[in-house]
DNA sequence: CCCATTAATGCTCCGAATGAGCATATAGGT
DNA sequence: ACCTATATGCTCATTCGGAGCATTAATGGG
């Protein structure tokens, strides 16, 4: 062994040779309205809200929270750091300065958005249409994505890589008898990127016949995919859905909200059983007749559970592929 | 509503008002040797390997990987971004410049470390001794931590806060009849920090009678706790343990490695059942007589499973509190 | 050689969690 | 009085995970 890890890999802590880089914050702010998962966008729906890293607050999280709450007058119930991107691909100019982007996921309830930068709430499936399986498998997957990804896999150099690609495609999109896994949103996006099926993949000139799905600038679709994946995983073991609900709601409304996020249907009775067992909600005593059929109880979230437990298992009773 | 989220919260994307900040990388590099989980440290075991962000590689991850591999000649099987810290508390000087630290978790096998910055492998329980429950509940928890945290909880202002603190303490440390949850490493550290039981909590002067546990500079103990928590969660659903194992090994050796990381004992038969069911290993045909009793089969990791599945459930058959 | 010790392995039991689906209850509309 | 749509209660079968008994196969001493 000629050199140690620490000697060269991590030169010197105190040396002042840190390259100056620009740091920005990018937020994936989510609400669910009318059974649709929505995300706050700016610039003609082509970008996620982004700002320079110049918070005067003690922590990033506190700063982001107070920002949003001051502006929307809605408490941002939940904030979580997503990922920090610092790839060279993210550079806008050809200069040596690099851009670091720290992304956050925030949950809130939709409020009217207006202002100079054209803020708008958009259904997130507008950007990633293949992610919505609530009405069954989208035709888009079978008709456009699957054949083109198979072609991409078959076009690989050696047979080992062909096999690997076919495997990744099958897993990510639930092909070859596998079932759809809604949590693989990021893997799916990255696969489409790698296969050159999304325009972002090619910096020079347009991609031929790109897939449906509205574009965003820079790597904001990737950041959105990261946020969706994280949220879809999180709702299964932490009671974060309630941050998206009004004070009181029916169990069906709660289920529809989860379904909107997960992009798939749930088994109603089992969903209720789970919510009951966990003691996540309590009766308000009121009843809603807005549902069309038998009136539903209105319930509210029992905030106490946040104290009572460590990791609450709000596991989803997902239906088997219909 | 007077202003939108986007208008003020995220001023202008193209404005050149990004504050210049320093960005550094901090690595939690883990190996398991002689049934002990070890972490690579520098500076007399008082810091994690840290370097400026000046990679000439395309991505942070690729850069970190090639760094470590070039130096150790061991493949870093697994690398994952942990968290980005940018709190004002992290500033070293009083100036306006802020420090952003992007932390990574890396898994490898231990190699000899030597060099100027005094690299050493250290048992991670040296820094967080209350995290090792392999020999049952550490006396430290019952004798020092529990009473002092209870006192801290009781000393809170109003009764609501007292109740909340008591709850957090009970959950994090498995008190009041609750069971120990090894994944809450970060919450435990943060609780001790908040209660002022670790010296890092107080920047002015020493804390009275700090808990046992070696210190690290800056917030490196927090970063280590973040890494441990992430790893303890990850081994349950992804086959990452194998990155820490030699080519061939016995099932008991594998179990001891998992136990070292999780800080608790597992049920042997159920552990084997799980590994079998998942098809994670295959026989090498060889046998080890080094174990003292009946000779054990030597097995190797079936790398194919990484391709075969999306999220492999390497769930741990954890024993109930003995 | 017999026996105690130490592991490796094979199996069984049980209870909790989960996926599915039947049956009944209660509204509004025709 | 039906029909439709939703709410809600319950049962059933399967799977999974926690525990523990029993057996097998090596080593080291008497």
Image (cartoon, coloured by chain):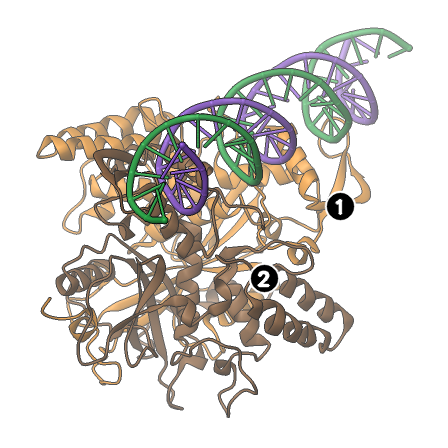
Chain colours: A brown, B orange, C green, D purple
SS at mark 1 in the image: strand
Q: Residue at x 27, y 50 (%)?
A: A245
Q: Is A205 located above or below residue A38 in the figure? A: below
Q: Residue at x 59, y 36 (%)?
A: B256
Which mark is nearer the camera, 1 or 2? 2
- Spatial CA distance of label 1 from label 2 is 26 Å
Q: Which residue is mark 2?
A: A172
Q: Do the residues bearing badges 1 and 2 touch, measured as CB atoms within 8 Å?
A: no
Q: Which residue is mark 1?
A: B282
Please tell me how crowded label 1 is: few (under 14), some (14-19), or many (20+) other residues with Cα within 10 Å: some
Q: Which of the pair B253/A134 is nearer the observer?
A: A134
Dot 2 falls on which chain?
A
SS at mark 2 in the image: helix
Dot 1 falls on which chain?
B
| Snapshot quadrant of residue A305 | top left
Q: Which of the pair B172/B147 is nearer the observer?
A: B172
Q: Is residue B241 left or right of residue B54?
A: right
**Tag on residue A241?**
none
Please tell me how crowded label 2 is: few (under 14), some (14-19), or many (20+) other residues with Cα within 10 Å: many
């Amino acid at each position: 062994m000629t050199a140690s890890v620490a000697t060269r890999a991590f030169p010197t802590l105190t040396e002042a040779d840190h390259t100056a880089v620009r740091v920005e914050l990018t937020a994936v702010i989510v609400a669910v309205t009318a059974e649709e998962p929505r995300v706050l966008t700016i610039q003609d729906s082509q970008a996620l809200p982004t700002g320079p890293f110049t918070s005067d607050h003690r922590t990033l999280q506190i700063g982001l929270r107070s920002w949003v709450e001051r502006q929307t007058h809605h408490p941002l119930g939940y904030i979580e750091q997503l990922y920090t991107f610092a790839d060279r691909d993210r550079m806008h100019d050809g200069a040596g300065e690099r851009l670091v982007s720290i992304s956050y996921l925030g949950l809130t309830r939709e409020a009217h958005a207006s202002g100079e930068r054209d803020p708008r709430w958009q259904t997130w499936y507008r950007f990633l249409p293949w992610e919505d399986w609530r009405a069954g498998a989208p035709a888009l997957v079978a008709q456009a994505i699957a054949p083109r990804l198979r072609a991409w896999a078959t076009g690989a150099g050696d047979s080992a890589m062909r096999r690997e690609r076919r495997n990744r495609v099958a897993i990510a999109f639930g092909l070859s008898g596998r079932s759809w896994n809604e949590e693989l949103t990021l893997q799916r996006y990255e696969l489409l990127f790698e296969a050159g099926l999304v325009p972002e993949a090619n910096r020079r000139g347009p991609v031929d016949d790109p897939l449906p799905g509205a574009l965003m600038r820079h790597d904001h679709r990737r950041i959105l995919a990261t946020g969706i994946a994280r949220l879809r995983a999180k709702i299964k073991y932490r009671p974060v859905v309630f941050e998206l609900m009004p004070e009181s709601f029916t169990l069906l409304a709660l289920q529809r909200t989860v379904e909107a996020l997960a992009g798939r249907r749930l088994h109603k009775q089992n969903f209720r059983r789970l919510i009951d067992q966990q003691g996540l909600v309590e009766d308000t005593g009121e009843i809603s007749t807005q549902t069309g059929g038998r009136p539903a109880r209105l319930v509210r979230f029992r905030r106490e559970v946040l104290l009572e437990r460590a990791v609450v298992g709000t596991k989803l009773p997902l239906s088997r592929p219909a």
